[in-house]
Amino acid sequence: MLTFVWLTAAIVLVALDQLIKLWANVSLSQIDTIPLWEGVLHLTYRRNYGAAFSILQNQRWLLILVTTAVMAVMLYILLSKKVTQPMLVASISLILSGGVGNLLDRIFREGGFVVDYIDFCLINFPVFNLADICVVCGTCLLVLYIMVLEPRLEKQKQLKENNADGQ
């Protein structure tokens, strides 16, 4: 059930990401930027022909191939139900939704660009989108799981085994 809920959330996030990108491509591209908080947060239209931080510029097919492979593995992991820990399911689902959102742009937009629109200009950060937020949040959860939660769970498992052996 947990996997179903998170996969449904991933589908909703992909749909929302694509709707916002459609709006940005049609409307925001005509005016370039809308300040939400002047000098801090703007909606700014950008075309990204690369990956995060504009690396691998103009490597459309490589990015499509790698992203498709990674997303397929993540989807398989979720559907095989080999992962049951809620934080891990959430993490993989968020990464999957963000990866698919940007993958759809690369496949279906002429020229293979990803639409970015969130401009945190206070620190001159690269413009990004909802899919990027999903990937970053999912990756942070994954790191947190691996570095904090998994060692705790392993320690609890060992304590239970030791207590069972001692009885």
Image (tube, rainbow, N blue to C red):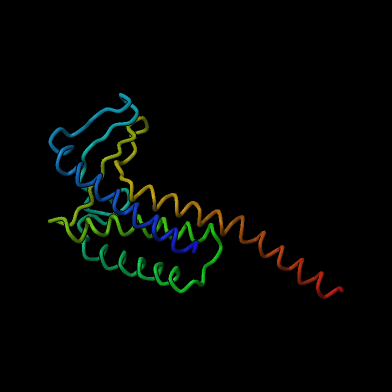
Q: Nearer the viewer, residue 162 or 2?
A: 2
Count of numbered badges drawn on the protein: 0
Q: Residue at x 45, y 54 (%)?
A: 138
Q: Is residue 83 above or below residue 58?
A: below
> Within the image, what quadrant is residue 79 found in?
bottom left
Q: Nearer the viewer, residue 123 or 45?
A: 45
Instruction: Report the side of 163 relative to 45 (left or right).
Output: right
Q: Position of residue 92 (x, y in %)?
A: 44, 60
Q: Position of residue 117 (x, y in %)?
A: 26, 41
> Within the image, what quadrant is residue 110 found in?
bottom left
Q: Residue at x 44, y 63 (%)?
A: 4
Instruction: Report the side of 112 relative to 63 (left or right).
Output: left
Q: Position of residue 155 (x, y in %)?
A: 71, 63
Farthest-out residue, front = 1
Instruction: Report the side of 127 relative to 74 (left or right).
Output: left
Q: Residue at x 21, y 65 (%)?
A: 61
Q: Is residue 46 above or below residue 112?
A: above
Q: Residue at x 49, y 71 (%)?
A: 81
Farthest-out residue, top = 38
Q: Position of residue 140 (x, y in %)?
A: 48, 51
> Within the image, what quadrant is residue 147 found in?
bottom right
Q: Quadrant of the C terminus?
A: bottom right
